[in-house]
């Protein structure tokens, strides 16, 4: 087992992306994939769960990440053994972070990278999940910190949370739709429309919410299609298959041009759909508590500035 292979593994495990890891390591993706497969063969275990659009660590992978990080840290310590440095032989810590897909989370990466730079013995694993799975993962300890919809984390005194991003529902329409010139719409304006909805297991609270809003405004929501991703839904809107709901936190102001669609705000929605960063208050990991405190202070400072 080579140290370079351990470095490759830690980079892939941290990024949870062969593409991003290969760019940072300045090697080709096929070469990186081959090294990881050879490592799995040598260990006799599967380190990564590979899916068509995502990558995750297995339980064996999470255990190996802790040990590999510790080994690399010890090697780095040896290389600087006679430097005038402070002796730091504290064990490596891995914090498991869960977050929502499709949202603009550049500030999350910025804060995590800043923390990592100041705490070299801390590693992060990052996984995209549905709001329900994020809540379950926080409750059962699978995740140390999550970035999720506030509405899924309500009424739980054990969870500490702070506002990360303001967020509300929007509606995507074909460019030449009769309502496409309006910047703001009410649910009542959508009475005659057909919709493209997320599969319910992706976000049951929101699907149930928009259906209830239709009923509240005197109509049954007509869903012609169900999709698994924002990209799939907006692509169908573009070709006139219906209207699709999305969040303002997903809208980076390039979507209208990219998909040749129009996006309007929905005014009459009352569900708390802001994005929060949350941890279990009973989790006593000192690095987690430090990270949450730093994020809370940073986000509160941003709110005061705005």
Image (cartoon, grey):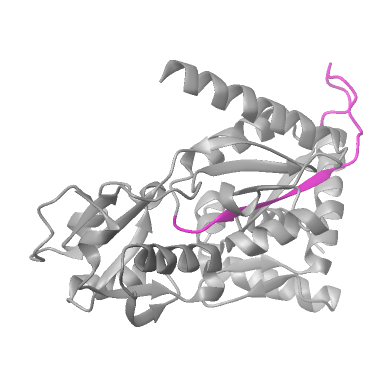
Q: Is residue 122 above or below residue 30?
A: above
Residue 87 part of the magenta segment: yes
- Main secondary-structure element of the magenta-colored stretch: loop
Residue 60: x and y in percent read: 83, 68
Residue 116 x, y percent position in the rendering: 68, 35
For image coordinates 12% across by 58% down, the residue present is 180
Count of numbered badges drawn on the protein: 0
Q: Nearer the viewer, residue 186 or 94?
A: 186
| Image quarter (top left, top right, bottom left or bottom right) of the C terminus | top left
- Left or right: 137 in relation to 200: right
Q: Position of 159 compared to 301: left or right?
A: right
Residue 149 seen in the current view: no
**Where's residue 158, x and y in %?**
80, 43
Q: Residue at x 88, y 37 (%)?
A: 284
| Residue nearer the viewer, 226 or 83 | 226
Query: Residue 75 at what x, y percent from top left?
Result: 84, 42
Q: Quadrant of residue 38?
A: bottom right
56 inside magenta stretch: no
Is residue 291 among the parts visible in the rendering? yes
Residue reaching furthest to the bottom: 224
Left/right of residue 254 with respect to residue 286 in the rendered view: left
Nearest the eye: 173 or 116: 173
Residue range in magenta is 80-102
Quadrant in the picture for the N terminus: bottom right
Q: Quadrant of residue 228?
A: bottom left
């Amino acid at each position: 087992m080579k140290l370079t292979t351990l470095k490759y593994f830690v980079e892939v495990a941290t990024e949870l992306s062969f593409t991003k890891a290969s760019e940072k390591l300045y090697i080709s993706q096929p070469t990186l994939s081959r090294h990881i497969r050879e490592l799995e063969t040598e260990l006799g275990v599967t380190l990564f769960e590979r899916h068509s659009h995502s990558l995750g660590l297995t339980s064996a992978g999470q255990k190996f990440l802790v040990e590999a990080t510790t080994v690399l840290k010890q090697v780095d310590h040896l290389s600087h053994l006679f430097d005038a440095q402070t002796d730091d032989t504290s064990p490596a810590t891995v914090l498991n972070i869960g977050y929502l897909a499709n949202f603009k989370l550049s500030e999350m990466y910025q804060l995590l990278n800043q923390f990592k730079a100041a705490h070299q013995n801390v590693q992060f694993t990052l996984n995209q999940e549905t709001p329900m799975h994020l809540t379950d993962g926080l409750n059962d300890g699978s995740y140390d910190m999550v970035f999720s919809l506030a509405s899924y984390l309500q009424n739980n005194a054990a969870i500490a949370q702070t506002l990360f991003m303001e967020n509300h529902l929007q509606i995507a329409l074909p460019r030449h739709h009769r309502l496409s010139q309006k910047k703001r719409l009410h649910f009542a304006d959508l009475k005659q429309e057909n919709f493209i909805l997320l599969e319910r297991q992706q976000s049951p609270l929101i699907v149930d919410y928009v259906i209830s809003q239709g009923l509240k405004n005197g109509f049954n929501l007509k869903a012609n299609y169900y999709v698994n991703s924002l990209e799939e839904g907006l692509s169908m809107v573009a070709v006139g298959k219906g209207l699709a709901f999305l969040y303002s936190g997903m809208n980076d102001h390039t979507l209208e041009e990219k998909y040749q669609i129009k996006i309007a705000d929905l005014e009459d929605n009352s569900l708390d759909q802001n994005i929060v960063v949350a941890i279990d208050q009973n989790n006593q990991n000192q690095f987690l508590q430090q990270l949450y405190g730093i994020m809370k202070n940073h986000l509160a400072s941003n709110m005061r500035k705005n």
